[in-house]
Amino acid sequence: MARELVRFEDYTRREVHDIFSPATKFTPQSGTWGIVGIVPIPGQKGDFVFFVTFGKKQAHHEFDESVTEDGVLSWQSQPTQRLSDPQIKRLINHDETTNAIYLFLRVDKDRDYTYLGNLEYLNHDPKREKPVFFEWQIMDWEIPSKAVLSRVGLRLDEGKSEVGVPSGGIATNQLLMKPPPPPKPAKGSNGPHWQMGKKNPDYAKRDAQNRTLGRAGELLVLAHEKDRLLKAGKKQLADLVSHVASAEGDNAGYDVRSYHPDGRVKFIEVKTTKGGPLTDFFASSNEIAFSEAHPEEYVLYRLYGFDEATNAAECFEIAGPLTTSFSYTPTQFKLRWTDEKKK
């Protein structure tokens, strides 16, 4: 009977094979499951198992691979692989919402592999190949206990992420409004988005799980809007600015109700990150629906480089429905058992 898959537990190649491909034969030190590093899972197109061994040498090439405290895996393909290889193209265009890559890692060839979780594509170097250089986010990352790190022999690199912290000149408890940045290249494109030595964790998921960060951003926007109207000589409107997310809850569809100096209402959705201005973010179906129902009044305030020490951030705003300005991917569906047949 195959073992269950449990994060931070150790597995032999045979045990991993028995979990994902029990109907096929396993041959030690031979065949796909016995020796290959990237193994397609039978019957699950686009799903892979990664067997990674740190410090490995092959064809006079020494692999330089690591995991950071942020859960970012630096990983290199086989030394013979090019950007044009079909497998590399599939990896570059990997979508973690529809397919899975399972990471099994060991620090030397004399150990078993430790299951660290599923991977999300972050980045690749469009200028280097043979091998191709990737960055992957280990999804739902949490730093293992010292006992696990000691058992596995894994040393985590210090995160070197470019988190977009304001470069200075922003007063404490203030927003610095900026124009919207140019959009980033599409996922998997060869745009100039690789920076050697920079590790780019998935801030979007962290932001979504950090309610304290979100609330701090909302309060910054609340104060900014009141101050903006006061400076425009509109004290009565400033007094009407309200923190809707606090008073009505997250189901209101927006966070702050403010006003233009001419009295027009302004429904503001606030999204805050410690990352840079192009960090992805999550929006609920209610937020998207509200933005579409109020296209003339809806505004997104995107706060980035949030600095906890000074309670300050840079910010740009985008007016109109979210679906007009952003590409988006549905990540969850609510299903109901019913006798109604889909027409």
Image: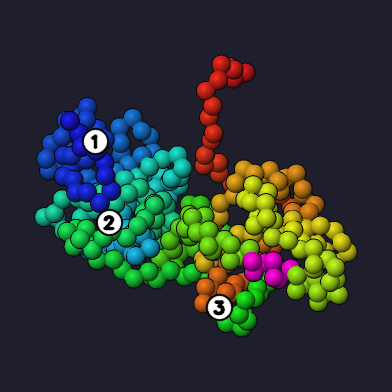
Q: Which residue is depicted at the point 31% across and 45% down?
A: 102
SS at mark 3 in the image: loop
Quote the CA–CA distance across marks 1 and 3: 49 Å
Q: Amino acid at mark 2?
A: Pro
| Drawn side of residue 108 relative to residue 254, left or right | left
Choose the circle earlier in sequence order: 1 or 3.
1
Q: Is residue 114 left or right of residue 236?
A: left
Check disc 2 and report the residue beneath it.
79
Residue under the point 59% across and 49% down: 283
Q: Position of residue 137 (x, y in %)?
A: 39, 56
The magenta stretch spans residue 130: no
Q: Say which label, 2 or 1, has the lower sequence index.
A: 1
Q: Position of residue 133 (x, y in %)?
A: 36, 59
**Residue 191 visible here:** no
- Amino acid at dot 1: Ile
Question: In this figure, which residue is indicated by the disc labeled 1?
Answer: 19
Determine the CA span between mark 2 and mark 1.
Answer: 29 Å
Q: Residue at x 62, y 76 (%)?
A: 173
Looking at this view, name the residue that lies furthest to the bottom.
169
**What's the mark number on residue 310?**
3
**Magenta segment range?**
219-225
Magenta stretch prevailing secondary structure: helix
Is residue 220 highlighted in magenta?
yes
Nearer to the camera, 142 or 317: 142
Q: CA distance from mark 2 to mark 3?
A: 46 Å
